Image (tube, rainbow, N blue to C red):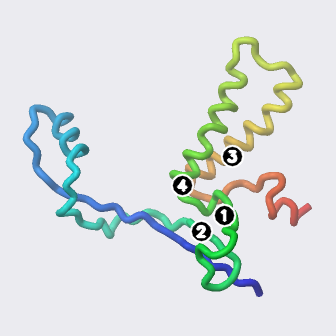
């Protein structure tokens, strides 16, 4: 059976509690954001992020050696998935929003892509794996 080396990561939030002199809550928040001194930071062990995959290589103990294997997006960090998927959704929404509208042919081409993008967006928001896409290993194996 093949072996794979996988690098998995989770984000650990850190916090600090500090008092700021300010005329308004907004000004106090601005001071806190602009404050670069994190010398008193503490890890927030109660709120770690979910585990996600940051690297994949064939073989045992092969991290950063040889060619890295592409990781399916549903194993990546949720925020990264959202950022990467945003342009797809924007394009799909912008295309039919053109003043002249869509022809029947353009609509038939657009609709399956729009439905697939919406389903992927739902999967990302619900923190579940992506739906199978045409051309994926799972889709090829089942055909």
Dot label at residue 55: 2
Q: CA distance from mark 1 to mark 2?
A: 7 Å
N-term-proximal mark, 4 vs 3: 4
Residue at (66% x, 25% y) in the render? 94
Q: Mark 4, residues whose alpha carbon is within 10 Å: few (<14), some, or many (≥20)? A: many
In space, the residues marked 2 and 3 are separated at their CA atoms by 25 Å
Q: Position of residue 108 (x, y in %)?
A: 85, 30
- Residue position for label 4: 78
Position of 65 with respect to 110 (left or right) is left
Left or right: 134 in relation to 115: right
Q: Earlier in the sequence, mark 4 or mark 2?
A: 2
As drawn, 116 above or below 135: above
Comes first in the chain, label 1 or label 2: 2
The reply to whether the C-beta atoms of the residues labelled 4 and 3 are less than 8 Å apart is no
Q: Nearer the viewer, residue 139 or 22?
A: 22
Asked if the residue under mark 2 is in contact with the one under mark 1, i.e. CB atoms within 8 Å, the reply is yes
Callout 1: SS: loop
Determine which quarter of the picture holds residue 127: bottom right
Sequence order check, earlier mark of 3 and 1: 1
What residue occupies the far right of the structure in this picture? 143
Image quarter of residue 62:
bottom right
In space, the residues marked 3 and 1 are separated at their CA atoms by: 19 Å
State the CA–CA distance, disc 4 to disc 2: 15 Å
Label 2 close to label 3 by CB (< 8 Å): no
Seen at 58% across and 60% down, the residue is 76
The residue pinned by badge 3 equals: 119
> What x and y, as percent, mark residue 57?
66, 74
Q: Nearer the viewer, residue 128 or 88?
A: 88
| Residue 10 x, y percent position in the rendering | 46, 67
Q: Which residue is mark 1?
A: 71
């Amino acid at each position: 059976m093949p072996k794979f080396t996988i690098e998995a990561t989770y984000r650990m939030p850190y916090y600090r509690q500090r008092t700021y002199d300010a005329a308004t809550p907004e000004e106090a928040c601005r001071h806190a954001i602009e404050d670069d001194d994190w010398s008193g930071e503490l890890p927030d062990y109660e709120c770690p992020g979910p585990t996600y995959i940051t690297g994949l290589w064939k073989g045992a103990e092969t991290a950063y050696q040889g060619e890295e294997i592409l990781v399916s997006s549903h194993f990546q960090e949720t925020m990264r998935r959202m950022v990467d998927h945003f342009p797809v959704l924007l394009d799909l929404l912008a295309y039919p929003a053109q003043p002249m509208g869509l022809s029947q042919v353009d609509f038939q081409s657009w609709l399956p892509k729009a439905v697939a993008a919406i389903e992927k967006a739902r999967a990302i928001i619900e923190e579940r794996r992506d739906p199978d896409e045409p051309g994926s290993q799972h889709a090829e194996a089942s055909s």
